[in-house]
Amino acid sequence: MAVSANSAFCQVLETYFGSGRCFLLAKGRVGLYAGLRALGFQRGTKLLLPGYTCMVVPSAVRFAGLEPRYIDIDPRSYNVDPKQLDLVNARDVSAIVVQHTYGIPCEMSRIMQWAASHGIPVIEDCCHSFGSRYRGQLCGTFGRFAFMSGQWNKPFSTGLGGILLVNDEPLATRISTFLRDNAKSPGTGRSLLLRAQILAFQLMVRPATAMRIMSMYRRINQVGLAIGSSSKDELRGEMPAGYLTAMADCQARQGLREMAVIDGQYAASSIAHVVLSVGTAAYWIFARGGRGHRGNSAAAISGAGCQQARSFSKSALGAR
């Protein structure tokens, strides 16, 4: 039986992140909303958010019946300032959303330590940071769940769309049930329009045209001829109709193409690492007349590099 594009995209993402379960939604903020609903907080519960964030994030918190509370940022990174956490009355909040702003990872070791000491769940906003790592670990794999955006202006784009990565299996089960019972299908009309927008973006948007095209896109969206990132209702703080909607298949297929590019780059960087390792070994062996432990060390380096390259090559070819 053929695997749907959505299922295939989820499988690729779960392999990439190495843990957790993925859910695909219309927008990244919808993932935050779904995750908060599944956590089961009482209405009026307070959540910590960074003081510098997109307005759709606190809107999603309010749509879930919760109250945002803000914590100041570090002006050097635009992320939550961990020193400010010690000033928070932890008994007054039930979770914290940390935003890896502009792809710069938050200081997760200090944040996770503070959260664990108070029993507070951490939620990661990875809308800017797909692929970013903190001390070698991918952003999105630290908290209970993470939400990511595939908007047009993001480094990883699915033509709008959102990814919800859940690192807690019981929570993932509750989210799956919540989405099964409440999320809407994008429908044929929306899917066709999204497909047309993805094609137009690929054909028309270049560095020299990006700003003009995005300006035109916003004007078309205002008159209802395109699917935009935010509606007038949402900008007024009202939950728009169709807010909880799944990702369309055409967006998942675009996501698969984006992941193939990432896999290809990963494989290329691995091959470059092997070439560099072999070149270094040759330098020690021949140019410097290296013997004994130098030769053994070089062999070990190049052997490990070749094994890594084979691993990445299998990944790039789809051996998952």
Image (tube, rainbow, N blue to C red):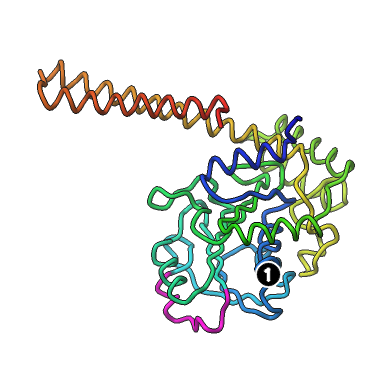
Q: Residue at x 14, y 26 (%)?
A: 294
Whether residue 126 is situated above or below residue 16 in the rendered picture: below
Q: Is 274 rendered above or below residue 109?
A: above
**Residue at image point 65% right, 34% down:** 256
Left or right of 201 in this view: 136: left
Question: Residue 75: percent from the left, percent from the top?
Answer: 44, 65
Where, by quadrant of the figure, is residue 182 drawn? bottom right
Question: Relative to residue 48, is residue 255 drawn left or right?
Answer: right
Q: From the viewer's perspective, is residue 85 above or below residue 308? A: below
Q: Which residue is mark 1?
A: 61
In percent of width and height, residue 127 lies at 59, 53
Say what amino acid the circle numbered 1 marks: Val
Q: Which stretch appears magenta? A: 82-94
Q: Is residue 36 magenta?
A: no
- Location of the N terminus by quadrant is top right
If the image is split into quadrants, where does the C terminus sit? Answer: top right
Q: Position of residue 73 (x, y in %)?
A: 48, 68
Q: Secondary structure at mark 1?
A: helix
Front in this rendered view, residue 58 or 134: 134
Corner quadrant of residue 57: bottom right
Residue at x 78% of width, y 69% of height: 236
- The residue most toward the top is 286
User: Residue 65's quadrant in the figure?
Assistant: bottom right
- Residue 198, position in %: x, y? 74, 36
Residue at the limit of the structure toward the right, as seen here: 189
| Mark 1 neighbour density, 10 Å: few (under 14) some (14–19) many (20 or more) | many
> Was residue 91 drawn as part of the magenta stretch in this picture?
yes
